[in-house]
Amino acid sequence: MKVEDNGMSLTHLRWPALTLASTLFVVTTSEFQVAAMLTDMADDLHQPIEGLALLVTIYSLGSALGGPMLTWPLRHLRTKTSLIAVVLAYAVAEVAAGFAPNFTILAVFRFVTGCLSGATFGLALTLGMALTDERDRPRVSASILSGLVAGTLLGLPLSHLLGMWSGWRTSFLLLGGAAAVMAAGVAVLIHQPDRAPAPDGSDHGGLASWALWSRFAASFLTIGGAFAAFALIDPILKRGGLSPAQATGTMVAFGVAALVGNRLSGRAAPGRARGWLLIGLGIQLVALIALGLLPTTPLIVVVAVIGLGATGMALNPLLVNRVVTVAGSHALSNTVHTACITLGVAAATALGSRAIATSGGLTGTVLVGIALTAAAGIVVAATPDQRAATREA
């Protein structure tokens, strides 16, 4: 196997990157499974749908809060070892959730899987970046994050199909089995090169740095701004006058745009991420403004939604790029970054729901997206790119 500098060539990274992307795909699909099977779960557990919907919130809180707390005690282990252990634990908890006899026990397992999912994202990114040198990290992170993008776009329909085909409990068992397969894949297909021990005091991933927290804030605002509208994409398309077939086609185009945007974002060289990120935020802002000003013009709505697909989640590689240049490829900082993104989604959807409830309608939630995106642009503009950090995981 050819080795270049501190990592493998991009050709030899194909299978490791695919394995890590597939791991994120499984975890992301599992995140959406409850939302896709609420009716069946409510009937089986004798719970109201609004009560079961709390399982989505519980999972998100586990990911945002528990992920960093779980990563901290693992910081002295090899990243590969930690990732295998976390994904295996995720598989066990996911299978156990499928046997939960009541809502309370299911909620506990959903919180646990949320915590493990947050740690999985940070560790997968860290391991992927540890396999290559600084120059190729943006492209590698984009390849890995394509699993997150695909899981976000396909997780809901896939979980719905699994639930229809086999029932909600079997869906948990199948996804738990898929997670176990991914843990085996990491063990067999990925070889983590030896690294020099981290300098004293660097095991916190640079979390005391203002520059790092400003980048966390930018990610919180960027993804939050996109999700304020993305979470309500179906009613937004209906308001735009699109037929069911046209709405489906637009959602497919949204997904394609997200995958293409993710790949393009991964090609930005370190030191140039801010410029590309500002362009992406500009497109996202224009798309949201168009949805706010011309919400019933079909062509404008379609173009704006595709624009949101090409930005939003697709900007993740640029956001990761800017974090890594400050903190290095460190598991704890990557996990905290994931937590900030998750909190951005939760905050945006909560604010959007509040805007709708206070008579703002769908335009109210679009305005929330505009405000968050504009704030993200200000934060990014105020924080220039830095030279890549030398610390490694």
Image: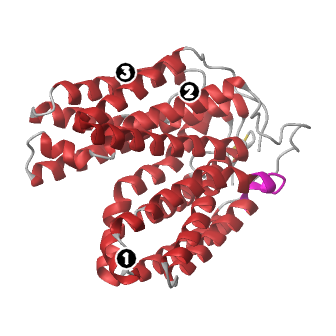
Which of the 4 image quarters holds residue 88? bottom right
Who's the residue at 46% across and 32% down the image?
A: 222
Which of the 4 image quarters holds residue 370? top left
Q: Nearer the viewer, residue 185 or 356?
A: 356
Q: Residue farthest to the right? A: 200
* Residue 111 shown left or right of residue 77 in the figure: left
Who's the residue at 53% across and 70% down the image?
A: 107
Write the start and end of the magenta stretch as one range. 72-80
Rendered-image quadrant of the C terminus: top right
Type of amino acid at the residue the image marks with label 2: Ala
Q: Measuring from the top left, give residue 16's x and y in whole percent.
A: 59, 57
Would you call the spot at circle 3 few (<14 residues within 10 Å), some (14-19), or many (20 or more)?
A: some
Quote the CA–CA distance across marks 3 and 2: 20 Å
Residue designated by label 1: 41
Residue designated by label 2: 269
Residue 123 in view: no
Q: Earlier in the sequence, mark 1 or mark 2?
A: 1
CB-based contact (under 8 Å), mark 1 and mark 3: no
Mark 2 element type: loop
Residue 131 in view: yes
Rendered-image quadrant of the N terminus: bottom right
Who's the residue at 20% across and 33% down the image?
A: 303
Q: Measuring from the top left, give residue 296's x and y in whole percent.
A: 10, 34
Mark 3 element type: helix
Total marks shown come to 3
